[in-house]
Amino acid sequence: MAKAGSIRNTNNSPLIGRCFVHPLFDYLLIGGGLSLLVIPVARASMGDRAMMSFSMLPWFILCSNSAHFAASTVRLYAKPGTRSALPFLTMAFPIVTIAILTLCMLFADLAGPYLQAIYLSWSPFHYAAQAYGIAVMYCYRSGCNLTPDNKRLLWWIAVIPFIRVLLQSTDKHFLWWFMPDATAIADAPWALSFGLVAAGLGGLAIVLPWYLYVRVWKTQGKPMPLISLLVVVTNGIWFIVFSHYDAYIWATVFHGIQYLAIATVFHIKDQMARPENKRGPLYHAFAFYAVSLLLGYGLFNCWPQAYMLFGFGPAESVLLVIAVINIHHFIVDAYIWKLKPGDSNRRVVATT
Amino acid sequence: MSAYDSLKARAGPFVFWLSVVIFLASLCAGIFRSLVRYHAIPGVGVEYISELRTAFENEGYQQTLPWMQAAAQIDIDNDTTARELLQAARQAGDVATAVSTLEKLVRLQPKDAEVRTELVSGLLGQGRVIEALAHGQVALRLDPHSSVAYSNLGTAFLALEQKDEAAVAYRESLRLDPANENARRALEFPLRGY
């Protein structure tokens, strides 16, 4: 426990909040502040489609995004108590996932588009939910316990970018199941309304977090830490400033960095709290990232090749593996970050 | 502990380790395939497009078509796969596949005037005049200076026996591109006097 205290944060300003490592680390990596610095520079130097034409992008995706997907699995098995608390998720879910993937692969024409639609719809929701979760977590650990009303409002504000994405590209998400082909034939009568609503939501996603911030300060007599505001605004900016494809790529990379940062912090704290621990925080950080990176490479780059070896088409092998890994990650995440009493997450969040 | 509880307690780890073994075996198989095919471990980029291209070049259109169709069907978020299929269908002269792929591309890129115009031509070729007219009007809104879009619209109106509208469209097409033979011929014969 003494080692756990070595990454103690000394800044307890109510505006900055209680950071895990250092305000710079927390605000830049976990809060997403780094994206607000990098994105304008990248766009100014390389234009709107900066990411799409970036030759190093696959490496960025591997080191950030692929590693982050694997990190949830690594955390699932490394987190103390998960094997007894979540027996289905830890024991049976991997084989269920493999079986579902193989089934979808066998009926790729039929099941593939639906699997894709589920994962593409779930992604922006997952990003929004992560932003909400991080915002609430920082409020909680900074002593600003949100009232149920404010919490609900924060949730709705956080999911605005998700709703906007659904409205903007109806044929790329689960709404596509319900959209008639006619929507593509002509400028559908509702296209303009959808566009206006989406533009309005874009504005609200940026403005409403500030309103909530003032409201919490007024109604609760204590401000939310600024990182809670930052994380929600940043997620909005990713999906509002960029075109559909670029938004996904920017969000993917910075969401991955955000996730890896917070997961590494929790992993270090869990490992340092183990009575038998003999290693320092740097060792645990490096080990966690190395395993995540290796697993991420295996999942995204080696696994599809296996399906191709068994005779499946290259596209379904790649696309469906990506879709299933995403869905597995979303489901695992929905369980491993809960702050239930007795859960090690609660201890990590409550202590510095 | 009952027999059921005992079985349950043993089944969990068994199922887990079974999935680990299957997964690790798959990874090894994947690496093996990459080593045999590329003489290297799997790369970090998404390589299915180049896999499809290679298959198309080596095995021919008919052999690769189901793979390509599955790819375009699944990839609802990206137009690269559909464009790949379109190119292959064009090369092979497979009009039906080209038109169905163009329909998919229009859904993926509803504001792409070029794709829309090509779809209209394809639909007209298949005699699907009403759909061609609907798409043609959108194509014209997307690119009001396209001679081909006007010419397509003229063809659609002509097929519907709306000769006045057809003549207007063809004249506009000819004004935008005096070398448009399709419009010139239509105005000379079926639309003479309109």
Image (cartoon, helix red, strand yellow):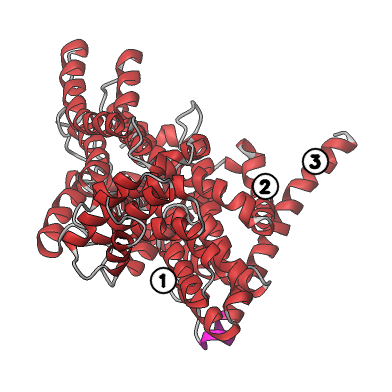
Q: Residue furthest right?
A: B3
Tell me which numbered mark, 1 or 3, is placed earlier along the sequence.
Answer: 3
Q: Quick check: is A127 in the magenta stretch?
A: no
Q: Is residue A206 above or below residue A51?
A: above
Tell me the kind of residue under disc 1.
Gly
Q: Secondary structure at mark 1?
A: loop
Q: Quarter-wise, where is residue A302 in the image?
A: bottom right
How many marks the image carries: the answer is: 3
Q: Secondary structure at mark 3?
A: helix
Task: Give the residue number, with chain letter if any, for mark 2.
Answer: A91
CA gap, disc 3 and disc 2? 11 Å
Q: Position of residue B88 (x, y in %)?
A: 49, 74
Q: Residue at x 42, y 53 (%)?
A: B77
Q: Residue at x 27, y 50 (%)?
A: B194
For the residues labelled 3 and 2, say whether their Cβ atoms are less than 8 Å apart. Answer: no
Tell me the kind of residue under disc 3.
Lys
Instruction: Check residue B8 in the rendering and tell me which mark sits there, or answer none.
Output: 3
Chain letter for mark 1: B
Tell me the crowding category of disc 1: few under 14, some 14 to 19, or many 20 or more residues within 10 angstroms, Cα based.
Answer: some
Instruction: Pick the quarter of the image with the N terminus of chain B.
Output: top right
Residue stretch rendered in magenta on the structure:
B34-39
- Would residue B4 appear left or right of B39 to someone viewing this image? right
For the residues labelled 1 and 3, say whether their Cβ atoms are less than 8 Å apart. Answer: no
**Which is in the foreground here, disc 2 or disc 1?**
1
Q: Position of residue A316 (x, y in %)?
A: 57, 62
Q: Residue furthest top?
A: A219
**Which is in the foreground here, disc 1 or disc 3?**
1
Instruction: Check residue B45 in the rendering and tell me which mark sits there, or answer none.
Output: 1
CA gap, disc 2 and disc 1? 31 Å
Q: Secondary structure at mark 2?
A: helix
Badge 1 and badge 3 in a common chain: yes
In this rendering, does residue B5 appear at all? yes
